[in-house]
Amino acid sequence: RVQRILAADSAGAVRLLFPAPPGATDGAPSVSPDGTLLLFASSRDPVRPDSARASTALWFSRATGTGWAPPSPMGWPAADRPSSPQQPSLAADGTLYFVDDREDGLGGRDVYRARWVDGRVTDVERVGEPVSTTADEASVFVTPDGRTLLVSRTAGPGHRGGDDVYLHVM
């Protein structure tokens, strides 16, 4: 299944926001609190953007006077590259949240946070319990002030079935 990010204008006309290479999926878009960045997960290959790969990477685009610039992959420290990150969400202070299934996780996908500095990601750390659990966290959203996280989870305490949404206030 291939996903694309679409944009609609004020007249309701819908268009493809970014062309993608054959087989690549773009999804889980979010906009930075100041409206200048569009963040998303994609199976575009960060090394060869005209190709697709099996896992995802996080990408971003900057707002221009007429729309969005072509997307760029986020830069990661060589020793701390994510496995297959999803669901990027950025707080106003530059803290980036995402989910990933890294080796240091508690189980399945967990929530991680990092510093976002002009397209580069640093200081990656797993967010501990009760935000990350032994269940599978599926997505994360941070409020602009960085004090509240919404996290969907497929199991765990209080689970009601399907994906439940949990609210965490710092």
Image: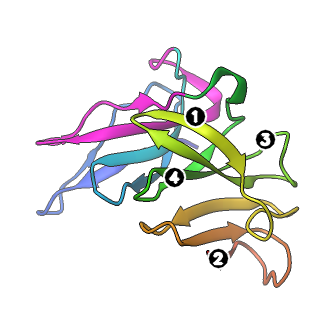
For the C terminus, the quadrant is bottom right
Q: Residues within 10 Å of mark 1 (few under 14, many from 20)?
A: many
Q: Which of the two labelled residues, at mark 1 and mark 4, occupies the earlier sequence position? A: 1
| Residue 72 horizontal/vertical position (percent) | 40, 29
For mark 3, what is the residue? 102
Locate residue 131 relative to residue 143 in the image: left or right.
Answer: right
Q: Is residue 26 visible?
A: no
Q: Name the N-terminal-most of marks 1 and 2.
A: 1
Above or below 92: residue 3? above
Q: How many marks?
A: 4
Q: Secondary structure at mark 4?
A: strand
Q: What separation in Å lies between label 1 and label 4 (alpha carbons)?
A: 17 Å
Residues at marks 3 and 2, CA–CA distance in whole angstroms: 22 Å
Residue at 30 percent across and 42 percent down: it is 17
Residue at 59% in and 46% down: 114
Ranked by sequence position, the earlier of labels 4 and 2 is 4
Q: Nearer the viewer, residue 46 or 8?
A: 46
Query: What residue does disc 4 label?
Result: 95
Q: Secondary structure at mark 2?
A: strand
Answer with mark 3 or mark 2, whichever residue precedes in sequence: 3
Please say whether residue 54 is one of the residues in the magenta stretch: yes
> From where the camera sits, is residue 102 visible?
yes
Looking at the image, do the residues carrying marks 1 and 4 touch, with CB atoms under 8 Å apart? no
Q: Amino acid at mark 2?
A: His
Residue carrying label 1: 57
**Majority secondary structure in the magenta region:** strand
Is the C-beta separation of discs 3 and 2 under 8 Å?
Answer: no
